[in-house]
Image (spheres, helix red, strand yellow):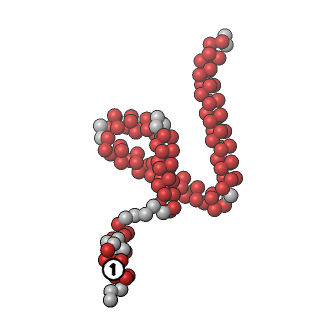
Amino acid sequence: MSDPVDSDSSASPEASASPEASANHEIETPESSDFVAVAATTFTTVFLAELGDKTQLAALLLSAESGRPGVVFAGAALALICSSLAGVLLGRWLAAVLPAQRLERISGVLMVSLGLWLGGQATFGLLQPVLDLSTP
């Protein structure tokens, strides 16, 4: 008489698969989906924030002046990696010191304040020639 477990396992190739074979079929875990979500959000945010930024314009000018775009790219990429590392380390430290909600509020206030300050500076710069003409 044959064992029913043996006949079931021989009938289904998936049941007899080794752990290594089943590891090849990666199952999406919460950790892997979190990784993808955080990586995609970070990439998109930084990429969009850097478009047309003074850093990109500086790289454009340096590449045009030097005629060595590969070297300029390597230098700019290394600089972005180092500045991002500083931001990540500072963010990690702040997350350990401050609650997440307070950190979000402080970040929001800083971003709005910076936007208002830069907007004021731009407005003043645009109005400066007009103000200079009106004085005798």
Q: Residue at x 58, y 59 (%)?
A: 92
User: For this rendering, which residue is in front, 35 or 114?
Assistant: 35
**Residue 93 placed where, x, y %?**
60, 60
Give the farthest residue toward the top: 136
- Check disc 1 and give the amino acid type: Ser
**Residue 121 placed where, x, y %?**
62, 30
Q: Residue at x 36, y 48 (%)?
A: 74
Judge left or right: residue 63 versus residue 48: left
User: For this rendering, which residue is in front, 40 or 81?
Assistant: 40
Q: Residue at x 32, y 45 (%)?
A: 71
Judge left or right: residue 46 versus residue 22: right
**Residue 17 placed where, x, y %?**
33, 74
Relative to 9, residue 38 above or below: above
Q: Quadrant of the C terminus?
A: top right
Number of on-image labels: 1
Mark 1 lies on a secondary structure that is: helix
Neighbor class of circle 1 (other Cα within 10 Å; few <14, some 14-19, many 20+) is few
Is residue 20 visible in the rendered image? The answer is no
Give residue 65's quadrant in the image. Answer: top left
Judge left or right: residue 136 versus residue 86: right
Relative to 97, residue 40 above or below: above
* Residue that mark 1 sits on: 7
